[in-house]
Image (cartoon, helix red, strand yellow):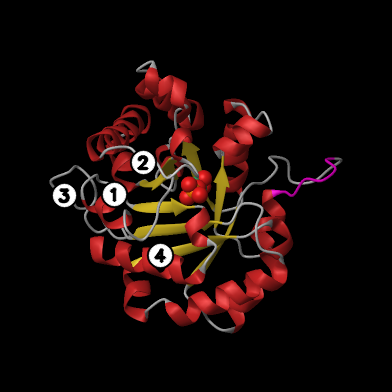
């Protein structure tokens, strides 16, 4: 990464935007291949020079997507949605960070709210996964965000601060600098709702200041922070220009190559 330069929003001006498509439990390996090929045709070279793009298919499609990306020399990064924190062992049904690294995965989502809520992942488990991803030289995308009730109670900042703190406390500055955070308010996921620009900016600034306090200013300037939750081609540009975010983590709208390409294009115009 190039040396950071401060912008007037306190973000780093020359950090490249990261647009990530989290496919969740969608697309079998055949439709995954078709979608990546279509995205390769639809996304413009100019946009892809400006914006880094990672694609996070289900585990069963990782090998197929990796092969398409590498054989066609596509400028997409391979991403995973989860991993186990141990490298190997008697963990039925799990996939380790070591296995993902072998497949040339570069980004791994950790602590997505659907895993925290549906699979009972605690902050401690999220931290162990983050450590495993870093150990294998990949980059974690650490998801944080409050529930609807927490927002109503006015405890958004407390929740986000606690999650960021649990993720990085005691981590070396150099390691923290490699992280991507995704601010995903749980009430905004799949609902069509998004936070207001001031709310989003506040969350983004909070994450950066918690990181500065725990890991130093250098790490705080180097991390990238994505926004996630009901991102679409129409709201991407505003979310990126007005708030200080360095990219978006996209669920539903990344499943279709056309709408994902439009989001990439909107991010390129915002960058
Ligand atoms: P949606 O974009 O479908 O709201 O999902 C957001 C998300 O959870 C991405 O990780």
Decide which of tag 4 and tag 1 comes sooner along the chain.
4
Residue 155 placement (x, y as % from top left):
38, 18
**Distance between the alpha carbons at the discs numbered 3 and 1:** 17 Å
Decide which of tag 2 and tag 3 comes sooner along the chain.
3
Q: Which residues are magenta?
A: 91-96
Helix, strand, or loop for circle 1?
A: helix
Q: Assess whether residue 93 is covered by the magenta stretch.
A: yes
Give the foreground label among 2 and 3.
2
The residue at which mark 1 appears reads as 239
The residue at which mark 2 appears reads as 194
Assess disc 1: are there few (<14), some (14-19) or many (≥20) residues with their C-alpha within 10 Å of its C-alpha: many
As drawn, 263 above or below 235: below
The residue at which mark 4 appears reads as 52
Q: Residue at x 42, y 70 (%)?
A: 261
Do the CB atoms of the residues marked 1 and 2 lie less than 8 Å apart? yes
Q: For residue 64, what is the image quadrant?
A: bottom right
Q: For residue 158, what is the image quadrant?
A: top left
Assess disc 3: are there few (<14), some (14-19) or many (≥20) residues with their C-alpha within 10 Å of its C-alpha: few
Q: Residue at x 24, y 60 (%)?
A: 270
């Amino acid at each position: 990464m190039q040396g950071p330069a401060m912008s007037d929003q306190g973000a780093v001006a020359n950090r490249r935007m990261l647009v990530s498509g989290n496919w969740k439990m969608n697309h079998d390996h055949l439709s995954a291949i078709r979608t990546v090929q279509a995205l390769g045709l639809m996304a413009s070279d100019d946009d892809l020079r400006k914006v880094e793009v990672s694609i996070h298919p289900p585990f069963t499609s990782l090998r197929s997507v990796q092969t398409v990306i590498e054989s066609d020399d596509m400028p997409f990064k391979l991403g995973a949605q989860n991993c186990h924190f141990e490298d190997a062992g008697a963990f039925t049904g799990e996939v380790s960070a070591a296995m993902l690294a072998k497949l040339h995965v570069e980004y791994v989502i950790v602590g997505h709210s659907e895993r925290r809520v549906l699979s009972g992942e605690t902050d401690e488990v999220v931290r162990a996964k983050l450590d495993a991803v870093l150990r294998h030289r990949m980059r974690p995308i650490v998801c944080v965000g409050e529930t609807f009730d927490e927002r109503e109670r006015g405890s958004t900042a407390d929740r986000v601060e606690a999650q960021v703190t649990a993720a990085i406390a005691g981590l070396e500055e150099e390691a923290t600098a490699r992280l991507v955070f995704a601010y995903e308010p749980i009430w905004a996921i799949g609902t069509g709702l998004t936070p207001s620009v001031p709310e989003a900016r506040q969350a983004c600034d909070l994450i950066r200041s918690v990181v500065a306090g725990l890991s130093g200013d250098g790490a705080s300037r180097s991390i990238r922070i994505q926004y996630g939750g009901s991102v679409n081609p129409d709201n991407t540009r505003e979310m990126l220009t007005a708030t200080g975010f360095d990219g978006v983590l996209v669920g539903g709208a990344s499943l279709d190559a056309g709408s994902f390409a439009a989001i990439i294009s909107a991010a390129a115009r915002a960058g």
